[in-house]
Amino acid sequence: MRRIGWLLAALLLAGTASSPAFGVSQSELDAVDRDKARMAAELEDASDEVRAAGQVLAETEAELPGAEHEVDVAQGRVAAAEAEAAQAEREAEAAREALEAAEAEYEAAAAAVEEVREARASMFTATARGVELLTVDAILASGEPQKAVDGMTYLEFMMEGKNLAVEEVTLARREAANTENTAAVAEAEAAAAEAEAAEALAASQTRYAEAQAARLAVEALVEDRTAALAVAEGARDQAQSEYDDLEAESERLADALREAEDDDDDGGSSGGGSSSGGGSSGSGFVVPVDGWKSSDFGWRRHPIYGTSRLHGGTDFAAGTGATIHAADSGRVVYAGWSSGYGQLTCISHGGGLSTCYAHQSAIWVSDGEYVDRDEGIGAVGSTGDSTGPHLHFEVRVDGERVNPVGYLPSCLCR
């Protein structure tokens, strides 16, 4: 189921993500169309309902890995955003604590300034009133040398105390100013940290919403896939019956071709005969339509049921109405409706070799008519068991289907 590849997943997810970032080129788009055509060819023997289910299966299988990856990426972004938000919150909390500490230091410094100012107020007042000079007069007038010495010492102590008091107040004020500046910086940092924490939290919530949306997309895909499987499984018997009918029709066609060959052998040449040797590439047939090979001849596994089925021809994708050419000259031995083949033309080229052209929208020749190599014999269509316009081309030897590629030019080009 994963053959559709990452291209379908990219295109489908581009729709859900609403983003052109994938940069899908035209050649990649063409490759997607080819993959779809191959899937359609593999389901051409199924009912319309099963075909639709097969397409859903193919697309969901292709999209699921990308959608699940988007979930993983979104969840990783959620975790990263939550970690960033937590770190921002821690930084904001630390900034708030630093602010509180700085404010406390500033308040303590301001109180110290007030305390020193009040403690030294009386000294400054006394100095302003000239108490120191009166004290000096008293000391000199004492008449006792020892008292004079003691008095001078006391005076010096008072002067030194005054100077220290001034320095202490000045220092306390400077420290208060510094702590005020620190508090202002801490306040700014706390505000910035809180803003970052809020932004990180919002980003986390956005990422979480993205993860939820991605998860819902995966769940929807799984539901679609489950429903498609249920439809396909329910139609298993019908699909097998239709395949058996197609094989039975192929056998009836083989008998008709053998009978026509016998008639030709009895009646003479088929007219012009075959220019094909049968077996080696480039042996003489022309490519019957201007298109590209969308499905090969051979056994292949059914994309839904897993059963092996023979695809008895080579499919060429081409637009409706495109001219179908006779691969070689010969006699038309069948021209009409043929069950799953839809509008069908078969040409006998003699020697037991014949070609058949299925799913035509129009047949331009009739039974018994002789046609030339490369002559237009009909138009491409999507009749019978077909999921889209294409030519189902068969080569038969004695009525049995063989790989057409060995009879066509190696380039498969017209």
Image (tube, rainbow, N blue to C red):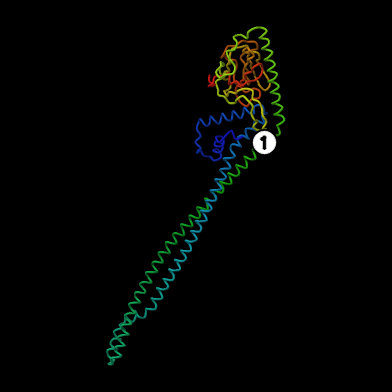
Query: Would residue 109 appear left or right of 13 to someone viewing this image?
Result: left
| Residue 14 screen position, x and y as percent | 54, 38
| Residue to which mark 1 is pinned | 229
Quarter of the image with the N terminus in it: top right
Q: 295 or 33, which lies in front?
A: 295
User: Label 1's element?
Assistant: helix
The image quarter containing residue 71 is: top right
- Give the residue at the far top of this rendering: 267
- 58 to 183, vertically: above or below: above
Q: 384 or 183, which lies in front?
A: 384
Q: Which residue type does callout 1 highlight?
A: Leu
Q: 226 or 260, which lies in front?
A: 260
Q: Residue at x 69, y 15 (%)?
A: 256
Q: Residue at x 50, y 32 (%)?
A: 25
Query: Would residue 161 appear left or right of 409 to someone viewing this image?
Result: left
| Residue 124 screen position, x and y as percent | 34, 79
- 91 to 388, vertically: above or below: below
Q: 10 Å neighbourhood of mark 1: few (<14), some, or many (≥20)?
A: some
- 71 to 127, vertically: above or below: above
Query: Would residue 374 appear left or right of 385 to someone viewing this image?
Result: left
The image quarter containing residue 228 is: top right
- 194 to 222, vertically: above or below: below
| Residue 381 screen position, x and y as percent | 61, 22
| Residue 31 screen position, x and y as percent | 54, 30
Tally of numbered tags: 1
